[in-house]
Image (cartoon, rainbow, N blue to C red):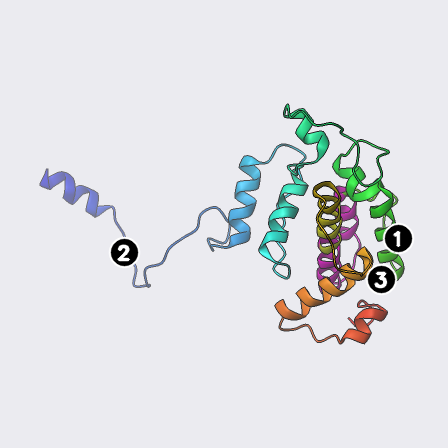
Amino acid sequence: MIEELISLLDSVSLSDSDDKWIWDLDSDDTFSVKGVRSFLDRRELPEGAIPTRWNKFVPRKVNIMIWRLLLDRLSTRYNLSRKGFDIPSILCPICLNSVEVLDHIFGGCHLASKIWNAIGRWLEVSLPSDKGPKSILEWLDSSGLVKKKKDVIEVIIYTAWWTIWRARNEIIFGQPNDNKDTPFDSIVSISYLWLSSRNCKFYLNWVAWLKNPLLNM
């Protein structure tokens, strides 16, 4: 037994450097939350699914809602019907014209379409004609804009999705809404609040934000 132990020790080579942990899931051996997220995405996400995104400038509850949205795990009427729930209708509760699927509620519905058109005019950008969640993110990622502008637009997109879903739930559950702002007004004010309170490098004033936040970046 001693001879075997000595034999094993003979093959061990020690260095004078400090001990350290090595993360072998990334090529540079460095641990990162992004590396863990990418590893889990590769293992768990179905083929063709949008990779998990996490925006540090919006609240956690919004990131979780967006994560569920991009996996098509929100409780739309269509998704509930597929799971066997007995619901009176699978039509969009906002317009009552189309089946409530993600691309409709967040893109094709008249409320969503009105919001995206207003955002496009505000930011002076040409959004894709298909404004479903996947198309919007593909447009953003391939836009060629600098990172600071992409970060701002992503916050606005997330805020728009959050606002649309909240408006939809208010209709279904009959929740009173004392806010007299339009959905677009809410998106403008909430996205500014989230960015200004969560990004220490965000210095844009309210007047410049109202005009067009991308002009001063």
Q: Amino acid at mark 3?
A: Leu
Magenta range: 133-158
Q: Earlier in the sequence, mark 1 or mark 2?
A: 2
Q: Earlier in the sequence, mark 1 or mark 3?
A: 1
Image depth: mark 1 or mark 3 in front: 1
Name the image quarter holding residue 181. bottom right
- Residue corresponding to mark 2: 14
Q: What x and y, as percent, mark residue 74?
A: 66, 39
Magenta residue check for 151: yes
- Residue corresponding to mark 1: 117
Q: Earlier in the sequence, mark 3 or mark 2?
A: 2
Magenta residue check for 108: no
Q: Amino acid at mark 2?
A: Leu
Q: Secondary structure at mark 2?
A: loop
Against 28, residue 11 (above or below) is: above
Against 67, residue 123 (above or below) is: below
Q: Residues within 10 Å of mark 2 (few under 14, many from 20)?
A: few
Q: Residues within 10 Å of mark 3 (few under 14, many from 20)?
A: some
CB atoms of marks 1 and 2 within 8 Å:
no
Name the residue located 53 percent from the left edge and 41 percent from the top edge. Answer: 40
Q: Main secondary structure of the magenta part?
A: helix
Q: Residues within 10 Å of mark 1 (few under 14, many from 20)?
A: some
For the residues marked 1 and 2, what is the alpha-carbon distance in whole angstroms?
64 Å
Q: Secondary structure at mark 3?
A: helix
Name the residue located 67 percent from the left edge and 42 percent from the top edge. Answer: 69
- Residue corresponding to mark 3: 123
